[in-house]
Image: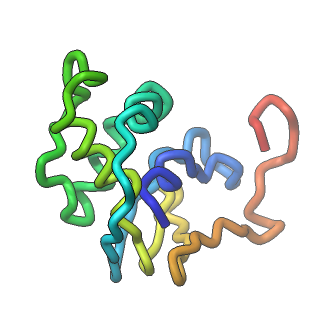
Amino acid sequence: MKLLTHNVLSSKCLKGVSVGYPLRLNATDIKVVDVDFNSEFVSRMIPKINYSALYEAAQSIGHHNGLPDAVADDYEHNDDFLKAVHHVLLEVDVVSGDLECPESGRKFPITRGIPNMLVNENEVNEINSSNGC
């Protein structure tokens, strides 16, 4: 699972959970794979991600080296910053571990890089359009 994926996952559809974001990341196996650097892609992703959640996730798995704790000023032209974000977003791959809801403590397993976010019927909030579930 890429940290880009982690950045968009939540558990807000669980009963009793109002936000469910960001999920705590507990990795037991991590793989780093080379991905061609594309500064334009990374700079376009910065406004779309929750940077503090990304930093926290990278820190929790020990891959925050070189990544500042806040978005760099004029980041579009800062190759060092963009390369650090590229590495964390696209090259760090969580192979196994779990994601934990910050409100309920419910854990979702990550197996072979795939997070299993399925919940039991009795765990789901009432389905309606106002909560996005």
Left or right: 93 with respect to 48? left
Left or right: 55 with respect to 17? left
Q: Where is residue 14 in the image (x, y as percent from the top left)?
A: 68, 55
Residue 31 versus residue 36: which sits nearer the camera? 36
Which quarter of the picture shows residue 54?
top left
Q: Position of residue 79 (x, y in %)?
A: 21, 34
Relative to 96, say whether 70 is above or below.
above
Q: Position of residue 98 (x, y in %)?
A: 46, 73
Total marks in image: 0
Color style of the picture: rainbow
Q: Residue furthest left?
A: 66
Q: Which residue is drawn at 80% across and 29% down?
A: 130
Q: Quadrant of the C terminus?
A: top right
Residue 105 versus residue 21: which sits nearer the camera? 21
Residue 47 versus residue 104: which sits nearer the camera? 47
Q: Which residue is drawn at 35% across and 36% down?
A: 39
Q: Residue at x 38, y 63 (%)?
A: 25
Left or right: 114 with respect to 37? right
Left or right: 124 with respect to 68? right
Q: Residue at x 38, y 30 (%)?
A: 43
Relative to 91, say whether 94 is above or below.
below
